[in-house]
């Protein structure tokens, strides 16, 4: 192909991509309004099945009732705020011009994802189950994109997503919601264009191998893997810990520290010894509040989901599970070892905060053990590079997150600590905007 023919081809291609993006924006905006409305109804309507899903999850999963209500309230508040419409608008506003689209086709000429995903595509979502409704974002993204959803529901969180999917089908989403199952072997063969995987890195290869061997997928099917397991917080001062102790404890202890947005490492120019008392007091408050909550807790809390202001969400208490014998034994050994090696630590309940030198800070492997690194912002950069794909987010304690410099790779945003467990529905797991990923023509 000569130069003029190649130029004409790129021009036609970029014009087509730009037109496709324009049409998509209009349709996606309508889908966002509808989906937002239908999801809010699931929270509000007594016949939606939400109360049954809550009861089943409390009795049939490892989730604690307070965490379930917290998560539901946080999600509903974001829906009411208009996150889905904002997500689509954000993509629309940031869309490239026709000239920019042409340039992207030039630089990405070997990338076939635009061609593969420009029509309605079949997307297989393999959901994690470490938190209640952790897979909802993927469902929303697939539906907003206009693609068809098939889901592998986690056996750790088997009630909420099926309840929502069944509810949405009643409101006209049947064409896009194809199928869901808890069993990998029951996933239908459907010529999938993309797989969205969220979960532990240890299970990724075995799941992929199982699907390929069962001929549910072929080896060329693209996968987007989200395997980050923890986040970092930067604490600039003792004052910040005292003033934001509620938000800080939420980021550390909510959901038992199991979320990838949960803080597993804290970097601070202040040593742990200097902060021992305020940290112990804040952690003890959580334990004491938990005991009171357990005595007064009732399963029927519909009003809690109808209150969407930030004060109510902020005041939600953090539950802690009872400590079993094996955990006590492990905790005793950890304390004894810390004392033996003269390591500074704070221990409350079954939680530990241990101080480690920046040269030897390990990757967090126990959800209830948090590593404190006595270091400055420059050292924070080294840790971000060290942890790589295991790291999800970077939080800042204080009034201005922009005070933390950004010498990080583009995928990392500096977030306020109070957004750790209350992110917008369009937050970026592993630095990837899922909606943009599923619609490469609007990049």
Image (cartoon, grey):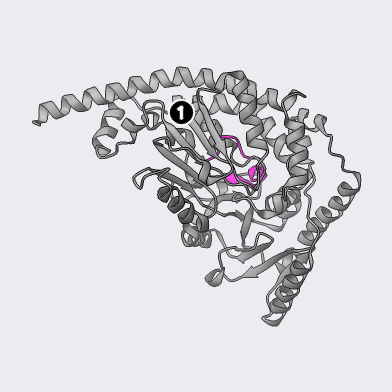
In this view, 90 is above or below 285: above
**Nearest the camera: 74 or 410?**
74
The residue drawn where x is 43% and y is 53% is: 209
As for residue 427 lying within the magenta part, the answer is yes
Q: Is residue 33 left or right of residue 160?
A: left
Q: Camera-side residue: 127 or 408?
A: 127
The secondary structure type at the circle numbered 1 is loop
Is residue 407 in sight in this rendering? Answer: no
Question: Which quadrant is the N terminus positioned in?
Answer: top left
Q: Quadrant of residue 323?
A: bottom right
Whether 202 is among the magenta residues is: no
Answer whether residue 224 is visible to the viewer in this image.
yes
- Residue numbers of the magenta segment: 415-429
Quadrant assignment, res 48:
top right
- Please count the marks in the image: 1
Identify the residue shown where x is 73% and y is 74%: 335
* Screen quadrant of the C terminus: top left
- Estimate the x, y position of residue 136 in percent, counting from the top left: 59, 36
Image vertical order of residue 196 relative to residue 23, above or below: below
Give above or below for 434 relative to 93: below
Question: Magenta stretch: dominant SS?
Answer: loop
Dot 1 corresponds to which residue? 147
Q: Position of residue 288 (x, y in %)?
A: 86, 54
Can you give x and y, in whole percent of width and height, for residue 206 in the image? Answer: 48, 56
Location of residue 114 with respect to 247 vertically, above or below: above
- For the point 56% across and 43% down, the residue is 127
């Amino acid at each position: 192909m000569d130069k003029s023919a190649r130029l004409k081809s790129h021009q036609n291609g970029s014009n087509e991509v730009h037109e496709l993006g324009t049409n998509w924006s209009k349709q996606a905006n309508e889908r966002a309004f509808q989906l937002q409305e239908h999801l809010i109804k699931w929270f509000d309507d007594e016949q939606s099945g939400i109360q049954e899903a809550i009861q089943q999850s409390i009795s049939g999963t490892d989730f604690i009732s307070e965490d379930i209500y917290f998560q539901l309230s946080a999600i509903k508040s974001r829906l009411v705020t208009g996150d889905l419409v904002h997500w689509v608008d954000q993509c629309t506003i940031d869309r490239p011009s026709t000239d920019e689209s042409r340039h992207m086709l030039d630089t990405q000429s070997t990338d076939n994802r635009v061609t593969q995903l420009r029509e309605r595509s079949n997307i297989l979502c393999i959901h994690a189950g470490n938190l209640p409704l952790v897979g909802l974002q993927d469902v929303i993204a697939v539906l907003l994109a206009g693609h068809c959803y098939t889901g592998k529901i986690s056996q750790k969180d088997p009630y909420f997503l099926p309840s929502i999917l069944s509810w949405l089908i009643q409101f006209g989403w049947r064409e896009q919601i194809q199928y869901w199952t808890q069993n990998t072997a029951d996933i239908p063969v459907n010529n999938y264009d993309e797989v969205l995987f969220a979960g532990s890195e240890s299970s990724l290869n075995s799941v992929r191998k199982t699907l390929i061997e069962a001929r549910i997928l072929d080896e060329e099917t693209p996968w987007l893997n989200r395997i980050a397991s923890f986040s970092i917080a930067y604490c600039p001062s003792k004052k910040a810990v005292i003033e934001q102790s509620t938000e800080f404890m939420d980021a550390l202890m909510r959901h038992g520290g199991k979320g990838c947005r949960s803080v597993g490492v804290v970097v601070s120019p202040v040593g742990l010894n200097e902060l021992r008392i305020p940290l112990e007091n804040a952690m003890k408050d959580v334990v004491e509040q938990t005991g009171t909550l357990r005595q007064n807790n009732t399963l029927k809390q519909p009003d809690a989901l109808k209150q969407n202001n930030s004060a109510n969400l902020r005041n939600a208490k953090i539950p802690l599970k009872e400590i079993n014998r094996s955990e006590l034994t492990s905790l005793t050994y950890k304390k004894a070892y810390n004392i033996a090696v003269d390591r500074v630590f704070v221990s409350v309940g079954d939680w530990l905060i241990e101080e480690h030198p920046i040269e030897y800070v390990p990757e967090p492997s126990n959800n209830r053990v948090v590593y404190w690194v006595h270091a400055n912002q420059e050292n924070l950069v080294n840790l971000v590079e060290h942890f790589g794909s295991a790291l999800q987010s970077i939080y800042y304690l204080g009034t201005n997150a922009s005070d933390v410099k950004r010498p990080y790779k583009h995928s990392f945003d500096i977030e306020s600590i109070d957004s750790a467990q209350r992110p917008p529905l369009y937050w970026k797991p592993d630095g990837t905007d899922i909606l943009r990923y599923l619609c490469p023509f609007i990049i």
